[in-house]
């Protein structure tokens, strides 16, 4: 519990608030860009939080019992960096010369290139969902008493993801989560939807299961009381503090003005602002320290993982292999899993049955699904998040931001492509490979059989960055012996001879079609090399280039995906990146809008079945 | 107003409800897949709605005064198709032999291949947001008294997009929108988050500004009273009806059972179900007709559009050209615009100033932004929706579904790539071209100057499907004379000679860098062809192939985007699709995670500035 507040504490907090304002003005003016007014509205909130309530060892940001501080309104970075100066971890000089400059760690919006930043923010509506993930880890897996404090903007309360977050926070009784909403009533281009109607916000937050407080966000005593109550142990509800504030607070020329969003003050205005705010200060403050904490479970030694084994020829869906492998990986204490209410389809339920205490149902809220994974990653866990491959499109912004957050999360999408059959195009992922390949530093895997799927699931658990596996609905024959190795970035040459005239490249269902096509072609005396491109990114350039060289540059690329950005692009991009090359490519992909039907009907209609692959190969040789 | 209800009306509705159940069981059993139990829970709601309240001329689905009926829970397609049988527009035979079959219009989830379906659903949480768009059009632009009835599932209330929808519905006082939530308490893998806690739903709906009713969803009299009240004219609030229902209602073997989601009944169970439900019926019912309606504004003749003109060499940002062109397009009565609270950055505010009655502020809710556009498209309008290019990632699932919905919507994303400078990676679209190219039937445009931008904005207004334009933050010289033509699917060869040794391809900021590189190379005696690839999809294969042929297959592709799926892929994909080809490609793209900095610093760091382009060209010639 915080010590009883004294008048001196409150006076210090008020002074600190002014310092944070002054520094927000100074840094953004020096940079020539930034959001000083959005920082000034929240300065008193942060001053009280940092000086009195946030339990944080600033010299040891990895301390397991540290509270977490997330700026969901990432554009208030001047305020955050002013806090870092006030606690003594960033110098005034770095703040003044680094902010928003090339090569500096003080970027325009916070990213984890800074050791005190958990997640990148700046795409609004993500910090609170990420905070839910961190709080879930704290309450259920770390079992540590840290709190997660999230500074939110009022504009971002219009994002549905904020309500997904509160819904899950109340469902999971996350009393360790405190959202502080800076209700300054002004967005970028003008007033917000709800303005200063803090009662409307209160009704919504309460209806979503939070304990809600409406306060004057510039009354340091009221802030202190409310933060103390919010941070106290016990209870079963997350807290939402609705702080009525004034944008640009403290400098009369910009206070509550519509046209001052995201603009630094010109130098002479900044001078007047600093004077009105009482001048520059260099207060150095530290708040409470975190308590003792046992080592986290995540830090435990890894248990031995015994992957499931399948017999060659046995028909097993790769989604089932995912579930089996994930359950096996559960022997590692750092592995957690979550799903978007379809775990009986993705087979994440195999993990849920084996390790219910490390499985988190996120219901149909894919943005929160990814954010929860990111939050577990912040705490050092290895999250696997699954849903239908198509529905990861719902969370693309979260996936993109997870990459900027340097998160290492494993995503697994089932039911990809027209292969799914009767459910129709809304359920068919036909853009997922393109979407995930375009994410910075991502790994994209697409196994064709259960053996490779299990090996790749195990590999994902040790990959950095965003890794994605596409699994298939239907059961297809196991192609490889248990224990075979599938390095990420490799591929398997399933058929080859010195006489190969054409190369067939597929993955997932189309690999099986490629094999059938090769059989047809063989009967006609055409020898085809067949490549299982289980690693779509990174891709095995050398093996593909060798195949292209041997088979006269003739390649048939077959994928159950739209033609843009998927397996075909991965192959063509890499081959044309190797220097001068002579190619004759047939690229078979889903080019028309599919409807319902059987798998065979839909593969044929899309022109990606064995017959079309064989025809394309013959045409290349004609 | 509906006529006063009689006992006969209610008896008929109850009978119809049983028929809808029987037919839901029959069609899904015949198909071997589908969601009968999710249909049975909502059958009474639909029976009363269709027989007594929905004003719809089934023989004229284009009647402008028709109410709209949207199945946000698209998996209840057996129920929807049973309704179509009951109103006589689909035969029992088509329902029994077509449902979920290849080539049939009765797909697994509803799509607008059916004339009575407004939007494709099946990705949950989208039908209600789409309905908000339709209701906005009805209230503010059509000014017609039709109502929008949306059947929602309870599981999908976990999607944040549903709350974005209610937030906007109450903000815009959409009393013409009625959400009917089928609270059957069971999702796919088990109980929903809130189960039968209809009071929790009521609190949430009320807090978000709706008029909420909790009813027994199997009490036809209560349903009738509530629908009458909801559909009555007047008021300023949307309605949310929370109907407590039983999944599988009417067949005791599956009622309220957890393990019967998305499964057809085996034949012998289906027989018992039909018997318990009172046997097959062939009731033919029609509800009220729509009233008279004047022609919609959308049907007005197009006014002459006078596009803005710029002087060559003048520095104008393409985002500003977008705003200018959109304001000019406003002369067309069918053009509407909406933005995600950044209209002063995207310059959509130019339209808002000129045509405030056709501009809709969607605040920071990008999913609802796209859904609103789709809804306006349903009513025949031509919507332009804008935000930062990076933030369209937030709505990828909505964009993907809009393509399945056959929507024609125009999306414009500003502030793309590292070009934006100091704001950092969260604000940099580096995946948008990949994302939009992978959408079925999409058009992807990326102008480099204001003249081409305005011409392409005008072209977008007549394109079918999803069109996307990427605009640039900074101001660059106008390259073309006003009035020059920019056909979609074309490109411009800005430098060319018979001696060209290498081709430089760029768009947006990199096109200007390509021009500067060509100048450098020219001084060294190297003649470079320069192509402005303003149309990234469709792409001008012939001109690219000709350039490749003339310049010995040597191309430098430069883009302010991650290397996967963007401009470079578009060029390589198309060139390798033209038959055997000999290429030497240098692909310059953003391969590392950028930070903050100036445009020049960041272009250089990414290796996509003039110096790097020139070096790449020299290397290809070495």
Image: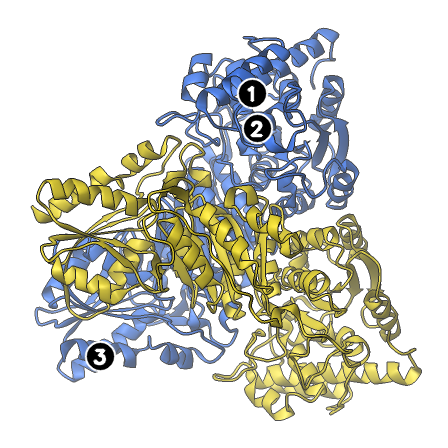
Chain colours: A yellow, B blue
Q: Are marks 1 and 3 on the same chain?
A: yes
Circles 1 and 3: CB distance less than 8 Å?
no
List x then y, in percent, for residue B546.
Answer: 13, 59
Please tell me which residue is depicted at 49% across the width and 35% down the height of the picture: B119
Q: Nearer the viewer, mark 3 or mark 2?
A: 2
Pointer 3 local density, CA inside 10 Å: few below 14, some 14–19, many at least 20: some
User: Does residue A558 appear to the left or right of B288 in the view shown?
Assistant: left
Mark 2 belongs to which subunit?
Answer: B
Q: Is residue A385 visible?
A: yes
How far separated are the C-alphas under marks 3 and 2? 60 Å
Q: Is residue A602 above or below residue B550?
A: above
Pointer 1 local density, CA inside 10 Å: few below 14, some 14–19, many at least 20: many
List x then y, in percent, for residue B21.
Answer: 59, 18
Q: Disc number at residue B519?
A: 3
Could you tell me which secondary element the residue under label 1 belongs to?
A: loop
Closer to the N terminus: mark 3 or mark 2? 2
List x then y, in percent, for residue A593.
Answer: 36, 38
Q: Which residue is mark 1?
A: B56
User: Does residue A583 appear to the left or right of A133 in the view shown?
Assistant: left
Mark 3 belongs to which subunit?
Answer: B
Circles 1 and 2: CB distance less than 8 Å?
yes
Could you tell me which secondary element the residue under label 3 belongs to?
A: helix
Q: Which quarter of the rendered picture does the C terminus of chain B lie within?
A: bottom left
Q: Nearer the viewer, mark 1 or mark 3?
A: 1
How far separated are the C-alphas under marks 1 and 2? 9 Å
């Amino acid at each position: 519990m915080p010590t009883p507040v004294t008048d001196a504490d409150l006076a210090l907090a008020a002074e600190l608030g002014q310092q944070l304002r002054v520094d927000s003005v100074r840094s953004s003016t020096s940079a020539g860009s930034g959001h000083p007014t959005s920082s000034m509205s929240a300065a008193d909130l942060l001053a009280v939080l940092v000086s009195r309530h946030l339990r944080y060892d600033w010299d040891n940001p990895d301390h397991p019992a540290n509270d977490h501080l997330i700026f969901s309104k990432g554009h208030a970075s001047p305020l955050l960096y002013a806090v870092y100066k006030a606690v003594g971890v960033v110098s005034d000089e770095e703040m003044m010369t680094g902010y928003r400059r090339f090569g500096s760690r003080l970027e325009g919006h916070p990213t984890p290139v800074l050791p005190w930043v958990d997640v990148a923010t700046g795409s609004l509506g993500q910090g609170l969902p990420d905070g839910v993930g961190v709080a879930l880890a704290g309450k259920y897996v770390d079992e540590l008493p840290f709190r997660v404090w999230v500074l939110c903007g009022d504009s971002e309360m219009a994002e549905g993801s904020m309500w997904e977050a509160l819904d899950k926070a109340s469902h999971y009784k996350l009393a360790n989560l405190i959202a502080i909403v800076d209700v300054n009533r002004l967005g970028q281009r003008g007033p917000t939807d709800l303005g200063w109607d803090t009662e409307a916000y209160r009704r919504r937050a309460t209806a979503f299961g939070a304990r809600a407080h409406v306060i004057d966000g510039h009354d340091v005593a009221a802030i202190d009381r409310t933060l103390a109550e919010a941070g106290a142990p016990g209870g079963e509800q997350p807290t939402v503090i609705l702080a009525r504030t004034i944008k640009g607070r403290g400098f009369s020329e910009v206070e509550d003005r519509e046209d001052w969003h995201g603009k630094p003050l010109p130098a002479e205005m900044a001078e007047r602002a600093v004077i009105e705010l009482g001048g520059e200060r260099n207060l150095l403050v530290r708040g409470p320290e975190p308590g003792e904490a046992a080592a986290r479970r995540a830090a435990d030694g890894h248990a031995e993982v015994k992957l499931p084994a399948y017999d060659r020829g046995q028909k097993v869906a790769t989604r089932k292999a995912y579930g089996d492998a994930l359950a096996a990986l559960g022997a590692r204490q750092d592995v957690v899993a979550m799903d978007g209410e379809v775990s009986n389809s993705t087979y994440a339920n195999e993990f849920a049955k084996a390790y219910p205490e490390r499985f988190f149902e996120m219901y149909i809220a894919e943005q929160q699904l990814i954010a929860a994974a990111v939050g577990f990653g912040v705490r050092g866990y290895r999250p696997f998040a699954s849903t239908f491959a198509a529905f990861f499109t719902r969370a693309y912004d979260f996936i993109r931001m997870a990459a900027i957050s340097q998160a290492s999360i494993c995503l697994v999408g089932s039911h990809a492509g027209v292969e799914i059959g009767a459910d129709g195009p809304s359920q068919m992922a036909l853009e997922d490979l393109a979407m995930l390949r375009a994410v910075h530093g991502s790994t994209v895997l697409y196994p064709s059989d259960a053996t490779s799927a299990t090996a790749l699931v195990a590999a994902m658990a040790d990959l950095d960055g965003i890794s994605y596996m596409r699994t298939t609905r239907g059961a297809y024959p196991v192609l490889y012996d248990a224990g075979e190795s599938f390095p990420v970035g490799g591929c398997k040459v399933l058929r080859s001879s010195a006489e190969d005239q054409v190369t067939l490249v597929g993955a997932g269902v189309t690999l099986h079609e490629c094999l059938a096509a090769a059989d047809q072609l063989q009967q006609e005396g055409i020898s085809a090399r067949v490549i299982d491109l289980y690693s779509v990114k990174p891709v095995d350039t050398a093996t593909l280039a060798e195949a292209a060289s041997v088979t006269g540059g003739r390649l048939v690329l077959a994928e159950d995906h739209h033609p843009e950005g998927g397996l075909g692009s991965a192959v063509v991009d890499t081959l044309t990146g190797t220097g001068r090359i002579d190619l004759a490519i047939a690229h078979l992909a889903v080019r028309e809008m599919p409807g319902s039907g059987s798998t065979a009907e839909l593969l044929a209609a899309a022109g990606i079945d064995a017959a079309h692959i064989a025809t394309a190969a013959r045409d290349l040789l004609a």
